[in-house]
Each structure stands twice: as structure tokens, then as C-alpha cells.
Image (tube, helix red, strand yellow):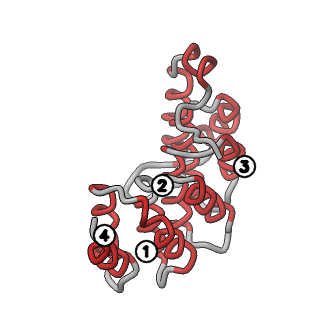
Amino acid sequence: MTREQRQRIVVRLNGRNQIDAFEAAKAIWRNRDPSLERSLISILRNGRRPFNRAAAAYAMQMVTTPRTIRALERVVEKRSEHPKVRGYAVESLAHRHRKETHGLLLKALGDPSKVVRFWCAFALGQMAELRAVPRLERLAATDKRLVRGFHSVAEEAADAIKNIKTENPFHRRRSGCVFCIRN
């Protein structure tokens, strides 16, 4: 990707139009340019609108570095951030994260936001995190809150439990979490 292309993507990602912001994020998906790391972190932290920050979090699935992972973790912890931004950050962390991320997401299963709880259930299921099962079972039994465009937190928790229980235990013991990266 040329310097000019990167600049256009960054401008669109932090622009006034939500559709343009997510189209810019999709462009990053098609062309994983690690030189966008700094711009993505900047927009995640200081983007003009929640949808700009959410689009940056979404795009960070493709530009995964230790710095982007730590930035996503900080967003998840920041309760003053818009739940949609935090949800996209959790979704990105489901695919690439550090060992420490598991504990952060376990804690966030109790978050006041249904969106954050939903995506934490998803992420922990993807990670096949056995420690999450008791908390997920509670959510599956009690949290009937619907997440717009998806289904209830309870259904996502039940899906995560199924995913965890069907994950190959030999693979988990032998190699740990396949999505964890080194700090």
C-alpha cells in the first residue's frame, strides 16, 4: 500500500460517515499493512466518534502487534468508552491476544454492558478458555438480554460453552491458546 493510500484510508476511517469508516476498515482487512499500526491505535484512542473508534478496533484484527493488542485491552477495561467500541475491541482480541487477555475477558463477563458480555462470551469460546465455563453457565441461565443484530447473551454463552467443551483437549494442553502471541 502506498503512502497516499494509507493516508486516504486513515482519513476515511476517522471521517464523518460510518459506512466510509467501516469500508476503510475492510480495506485494511484486504491489505494488512503493519505500517498502519500507529494510526489505528491513535484512532482507537482519540477517534472523533464512537463509530470511528469501533472501525479502528475492527481493523486491528488484521494489524496485530503487541502494541495493538495492549491498546485493545485498555479499551476493554475503559468503562467510560462506548460499549460498541469495547465490543469490537473484544471481538478483535478473540482472534489474536496475549495470555493476560484471558483474565481480562473473564473479568469483563460481569460487565454492565450486554454488548461487552456478549463479545466476551464469544471470545472466551473461541479461546476455549476452560476457566470461563462456570461464569458462562450462569450467563446462559440468566442473561436473556438481546444484542441488536445478533441474539441474546445467554445464547452466545451457551454457544461458547459448546465450543469450549468440543475443543480438542490434547491440542489445548500441548500448545496452549493458539491465538496468544508473545508480548
Label 3: which secondary element: helix
Residue type, mark 2 in image:
Leu
**Residue 65 percent coordinates (x, y):** 53, 53
Q: Residue at x 51, y 22 (%)?
A: 167
Where does label 2 land, which residue? 146
Camera-side residue: 90 or 34?
Answer: 34
Disc 4 residue type (three-letter):
Ala
The residue mark sitting in front, 4 or 3, is 4
Mark 4 vs mark 3: which is more N-terminal? 4
Q: Is residue 1 shown left or right of residue 146?
A: left
Q: Callout 2: helix, strand or loop? A: loop
Q: Which residue lies furthest to the front in this view?
A: 2
* Label 4 – label 1 distance at C-alpha: 12 Å
**Label 1 Cα crowd, 10 Å radius (few <14 / some 14-19 / many 20+):** many
> Residue at 61% across / 72% down in the picture?
81
Question: Residue 107 got which mark?
Answer: 3
Q: Position of residue 156 (x, y in %)?
A: 50, 42
Q: What element carries label 1?
A: helix
Tell me the kind of residue under disc 3. Answer: Lys
Question: Mark 1 highlights which residue?
Answer: 51
Quadrant location, the N terminus: bottom left
Marks 4/3: CA–CA distance: 32 Å
